[in-house]
Amino acid sequence: MSSTLSAAWARRLNTLQLVLVGIFLLAPVVWMVLASFKQSSDVIAYPPTLLFTPTIENYRALIETTPFLSYAINSIIVTVGSTTLGIVFGVPAAFVISWTRVSWPAVLTLAARMVPGALFLLPWYILFRNLGMIGSYWPLILSHAVITMPIVIWILLPYFDGIPRSIYEAAQVDGCSVTRVLWRIALPLVGSGVAIAAILAFVFSWNFFLFVLVLSTSDTKTMIAASFNFVGEGSTRWGVLMAVATLIALPPLMLAMVVQRWLVAGLTLGAVKG
Amino acid sequence: MASIRLRNIVKTFGGPNVISNLSLDIDDREFVVFVGPSGCGKSTLLRIIAGLEPVTEGDVFIGEQRVNTLPAARRNIAMVFQDYALYPHMTVYGNMAFALELRGLSKAEIDTRVRRAATMLDIEPYLDRRPKALSGGQRQRVAMGRAIVRDPQAFLFDEPLSNLDARLRGQVRAEIKALSQQLKTTMIFVTHDQVEAMTMADRIVVLHAGVIQQYDTPEQVYEKPANQFVAGFIGSPTMNFLPVRLQGDSVVLAGDGRALSLGDEHRGRLRSAGGEATLGVRPEHLVLCNPGDGIAASIKLVEPLGSDTMVHFDLAGTAAIARVDPATKPKVGETIALRMAPSRVHMFDVKSGQVLA
């Protein structure tokens, strides 16, 4: 009887914890979305107003006063380009690291990801300028590949490591070259991992601010860099800023909702593999 | 079909040698079993032949071709792995057809070969299934089928029966043996199970610490072991080893000085070895006799197996076993007399363990 009671209480406490954490994590997102539908005066009102007359004025201003569609297309080009590069180079890299069991390249890619991004900016800017690439999408795609590739490698490593070695060896004995082992045997077995890696790479690239801020021009500016236009020295257009932030957050949010089940499985695979 | 020759093979993984200066000739169409305890290098040797492991030194020949630098993909050998290593995303048909597709064979030819092998192995009803929908025994057959369809120069088996239960193991063992007689292809089979080695092989390679201890027919390995390791490894229960010495003109047990009647031949061997040796005798060659005709021993444990009864006793401080007729109904605590036929007794050098000729 008492154990049933304590189990019920434990369940309630669990739920309470989840609700508290959920409120803590979701409050800024809810505030952002609500603020995007408020008049400018309501956005900065103190105490914050929960009841207000919703307006789409901020969205209208965003679309009418800025080349928002161009920014969105730029974002898609840069994100899809860098995610593709990350997959094209990251998948074989993860496979070879797993195959050879030489781990330093994986550590190196992680180190490259861990150092402050600002460290890369000046050398890259000079390099891309000397190559005449500033103004094109390439500096943005290539710089974002530094974000996407480590993600792809580190997500896929446990997937490749999880394939029994003897399956690779059986394929070799059957007549496969290393490339063919990857293409015909390993890749079909890590399909869900590739999907997870692609989605996470997409989200990280989509949201990455620093590189596009410095390496983009007015023609290649992405949504996230364009959002900075609404932050002024004297005044900030909070309503429009929240509208653009909401639109920026939408694609990753939708992707995360679609694949949330795989996402959790994919992120914890290395941990539960033993 | 091809012969396989290994010449002065050395293999190291950075530390001590796993295989030390090993040379071996396997004839065309021969069924050779590599047997030895864990870590003896038998699987490494198989992987070297397969091309999955490079040699540190030495040469590997398949047929007349030196294959040291030839990748596994181009050696035209087939291998059955311990865990079967079936491709989980392919059907049984896909698994069996895969190597043939890589070779660029026509679909009709692939279909003919796959169905012929499937019929031979009785797996035709499962051709459309994925490996996860098969039992262990069925997966084992698919792994063999995948090897058979390729018509390779040699089949390599890496402990393929170790994941099967005892009943299935016996059945598949017989099937592989029958298959080898049917296919008439060179086969190398790795196992740590001496029963598999004895029942399947034309010749057995007994390995220990990366060195071939003996390479001979099962009968010779059993009847005439080259050294104490082979004598102890092959045979179940294991051979009894008793320290003996020469006392005057008699061979006596070193533990208690009781004399054994073994004849001139063994006396000569002992003399040449400096008067001390290790006597080896298999449990079935210790025969019950009348008191006074043999050595007396007190029974410590009786293990009735149905067909035989194992009698455990102590001889001059050394534990020993005799395999006796169950009709004798031996009892614990009873004193029995045992004798050994001199022709069934082996003498080993105390230091080197080599058989005394």
Image (cartoon, coloured by chain):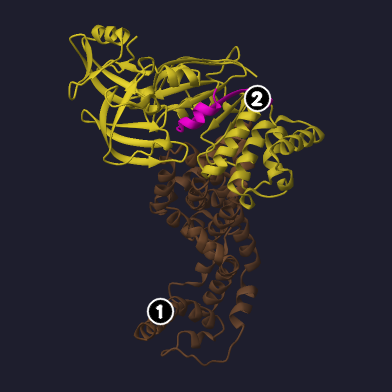
Chain colours: A brown, B yellow
Amino acid carrying mark 2 in the image? Gln
Q: Is residue B125 visible?
A: yes
Magenta residues (range):
B182-201
Q: Is residue A40 left or right of residue A180?
A: left
Q: SS at mark 1? A: helix
> Is residue A37 covered in magenta?
no
In the picture, the disc for residue B67 is: none
Q: Could you tell me if the residues under marks 1 and 2 are in contact, i.e. CB atoms within 8 Å? A: no
In the picture, the disc for residue A14 is: 1
**How far from the left and from the top, in percent, is residue B205?**
47, 21
Query: Mark 1: few, some, or many residues within 10 Å (few <14, many ≥20)?
Result: few
In the picture, the disc for residue B181 is: 2
**How far from the left and from the top, in percent, is residue B294?**
29, 23
Q: SS at mark 2? A: helix
**How far from the left and from the top, in percent, is residue B127?**
72, 45
Same subunit, tags 1 and 2:
no
Q: Quadrant of residue B288?
A: top left
